[in-house]
C-alpha cells in the first residue's frame, strides 16, 4: 500500500509539473510599450486615407505645423513605416535642413535627384532626412521621398538645431 501511495504522489507531482512547464500552447501577452517621439517607432504599414500615389503627413517644424505627403517609393514607404519620428534638423549650405535618421533602403531608387524647394528627401551616403528650401541641383545619392508645403518660409528661416516631428496625417 505504501508503494501505491508513493506512486500516486509521484503521478500527481508529474501532472502538475507538466501543466506548469508549458507546451508552447499558452497565450502570452506582450508587455505594453509606449512609443517615444524621439526615435523611430517600429511597426508595419499603417492604413492611411491617402491615395495610391501618396500618403499625407504632418511636419511640426519647431512650433509650426506644415503639411506634406510621402510618395510610394521603397524608401518613402520605409520612412512611413517608422513614423512618427522626431529629429534635430540643422542647416546645410543655406539650401536645406538635414537630420540624421537610420538608413532607408535604396533598392529600386534612382541613383540621384535634382530636388526642388519643398521636396522632402533622403541623402543616402550620410543617412539624413532632408528638407529642401533652396535649389541644390542634381546630386548622386539624393532620393526624393515626397513634398512639403512651407508658405511662410519657416524651414529657410529656422536657425540652430530645430526639433522636427514627422507623422502620418490620418
Image: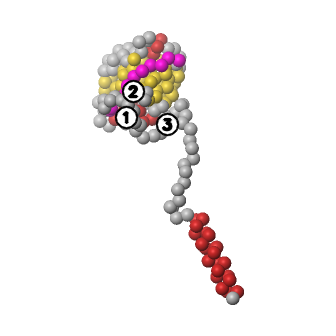
Tag 1 or tag 2, which sits nearer the N-term?
A: 2
Q: Residue at x 63, y 75 (%)?
A: 12
Q: Which mark is residue 77?
A: 1
Q: Position of residue 33 (x, y in %)?
A: 56, 41
Q: Residue at x 38, y 25 (%)?
A: 69
Instruction: Please say if 133 is above or below 79.
Output: above
Tag 3 or tag 1, which sits nearer the N-term?
A: 3
Q: Position of residue 18 (x, y in %)?
A: 58, 69
* Magenta stretch: dominant secondary structure: strand
Helix, strand or loop at disc 1?
helix
Q: Which residue is mark 2?
A: 56
Which image quarter: residue 93?
Answer: top left
**Label 2 vs label 3, nearer the camera:** 2
Q: Which residue is mark 3?
A: 41
Quadrant in which the N terminus appears: bottom right
Q: Is residue 87 left or right of residue 72?
A: right
Q: CA distance from mark 2 to mark 1?
A: 12 Å
Magenta range is 63-73
Crowding near the residue tagged with mark 1, few <14, some 14–19, many ≥20 C-alpha atoms within 10 Å: some
Q: Check if residue 69 falls in the magenta segment.
A: yes
Callouts 1 and 3 close, C-beta under 8 Å: no
Instruction: Please say if 30 is above or below 71.
Output: below
Q: CA distance from mark 1 to mark 3?
A: 14 Å
Amino acid at each position: 500500500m505504501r508503494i501505491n501511495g508513493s506512486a500516486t504522489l509521484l503521478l500527481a507531482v508529474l501532472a502538475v509539473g507538466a501543466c506548469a512547464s508549458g507546451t508552447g500552447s499558452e497565450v502570452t501577452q506582450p508587455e505594453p510599450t509606449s512609443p517615444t517621439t524621439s526615435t523611430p517607432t517600429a511597426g508595419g504599414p499603417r492604413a492611411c486615407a491617402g491615395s495610391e500615389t501618396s500618403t499625407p503627413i504632418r511636419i511640426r517644424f519647431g512650433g509650426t505645423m506644415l503639411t506634406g505627403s510621402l510618395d510610394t517609393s521603397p524608401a518613402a514607404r520605409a520612412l512611413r513605416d517608422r513614423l512618427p519620428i522626431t529629429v534635430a534638423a540643422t542647416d546645410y549650405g543655406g539650401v536645406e535642413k538635414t537630420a540624421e535618421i537610420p538608413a532607408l533602403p535604396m533598392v529600386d531608387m534612382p541613383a540621384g535627384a535634382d530636388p526642388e524647394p519643398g521636396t522632402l528627401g533622403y541623402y543616402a551616403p550620410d543617412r539624413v532626412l532632408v528638407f529642401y528650401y533652396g535649389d541644390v541641383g542634381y546630386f548622386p545619392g539624393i532620393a526624393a521621398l515626397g513634398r512639403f508645403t512651407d508658405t511662410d518660409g519657416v524651414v529657410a528661416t529656422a536657425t540652430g538645431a530645430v526639433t522636427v516631428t514627422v507623422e502620418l496625417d490620418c
